Image: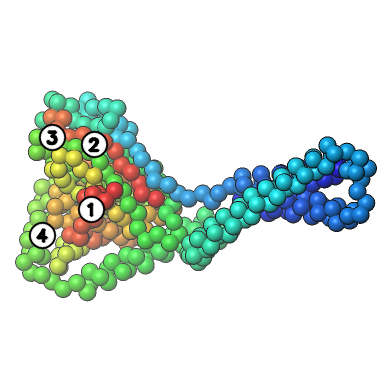
Amino acid sequence: MSSRFVSVIAIVCGVVLCASAERPAFATDINKAAPQCQADFPEAMDLIMHENNGVHTAPQSTSFQWVTCSIPRSPLAANATSGSFYVDGDNLGGASTTCWVSSYDYTGVLLGSTSFTTSLPHYDMLLTLPVAQLGVWAYTSLTCALPANANGLLRGVTVVQ
Amino acid sequence: MKIPGVALGALVVAAGVSLYFHESESTPTAPTIMQSASPAGDARVAQLTRQVEALQRSLSAVQSQLASQKQTSAPDRAAAAKDSPPPELDVAAQRAQELERRRLYMAGVAAGFNNEKIDPAWATRVASRVSATFEGNEELRKRLRGVECRTQTCRLQMDEDDSVALSRQMPFLSLSLVDVLPSMSVDHIDQGNGHSTMILYMSSRAGAASGAGK
């Protein structure tokens, strides 16, 4: 009887081990909110405002201002041909926002970039770079020219993995 | 971790089932005293038998689920095995591989540009925009060595060095030309004297789309 009990325990342990085996890990999308974005130039630091839902220029800013955001990412899948990025934000009063995603090699060499400009009140833009510009060792960033007078909010960027 | 975990689990289950039934088969005509003498023992055995049957059903379900997952991911894995570097490939080799991939990509971009027909109207209009952009920026202007536009692509050649002066100007270049040349692929040719030539293939092909399907 006791050996049968041991057998049953062994079966239970086996089933538990099977059921709890790790599932394969896949890269997933990464959302990055824009409050982490920084002014590109020191003279603009006081003209960039960071809110909990994004970043915009200060009301007293009379011209557009540059911000750059880091884009965390994982290596693309082995069979991927390109990488994509969604950039989201708002324009107020007919203002327009221009953004581009750049990719740099680990040595600092610019590999490529892709950009958009939009005056949509709410934008959700998809940018794509070829895989040759998104190597395992490449760094990517988002740079935007935000409209003056707080007339545009950059909400964030999503890396599609 | 996944495969050893499953294998270990399956092994333990197999051992448990084997041991359980081996014991049942090896003593079919010689029930233990406890079995024959105790109705409570019989009930316990029956309960354990039911548990074993339930566990066997669970195991079958898990096995079929695993088989299904393997079948689904088999093409992906095959593709990954074909394209991805083997695990023992070191960083230097991996970087060399990426460099080669980039070289091939840029060779394709250059060939595409060379094969592009010339649309005189577009080429003149966009080359004029590019020139105006460079004229309006001292740092860019002094580095520009040539502009050639065709139907949807312009090739710009610029001097570059180790300073950050040029990279600081790239946002202005992108901003000025985003409406006509929104995407760029960049090549760098080492001149061997601490300087290199940056070749920008700027294209009118949209690198962006409204993400309505997100």
A135 vs B41, nearest the viewer: B41
Callout 2, which amino acid? Answer: Leu
Q: Residue at x 7, y 61 (%)?
A: B125
Q: How many marks?
A: 4
| Label 1 to label 2: alpha-carbon separation | 16 Å
Mark 2 chain = A
Q: Chain of mark 4?
A: B
- In the rendered structure, which amino acid carries the disc numbered 4? Val
Task: Have a look at marks 1 and 4 and say if they share a chain.
Answer: yes
Q: Marks 4/2: CA distance?
A: 29 Å
Q: Is residue A11 left or right of residue B175?
A: right
The foreground one among A111 and A86 is A86
Is disc 1 in the same subunit as disc 2?
no
**Dot label at residue A154:** 2
Nearest-to-viewer mark from 4 and 2: 2
**Residue B126 numbered mark, or none:** 4
Quadrant in which residue B38 is drawn = top right
Q: Residues within 10 Å of mark 3 (few under 14, many from 20)?
A: some
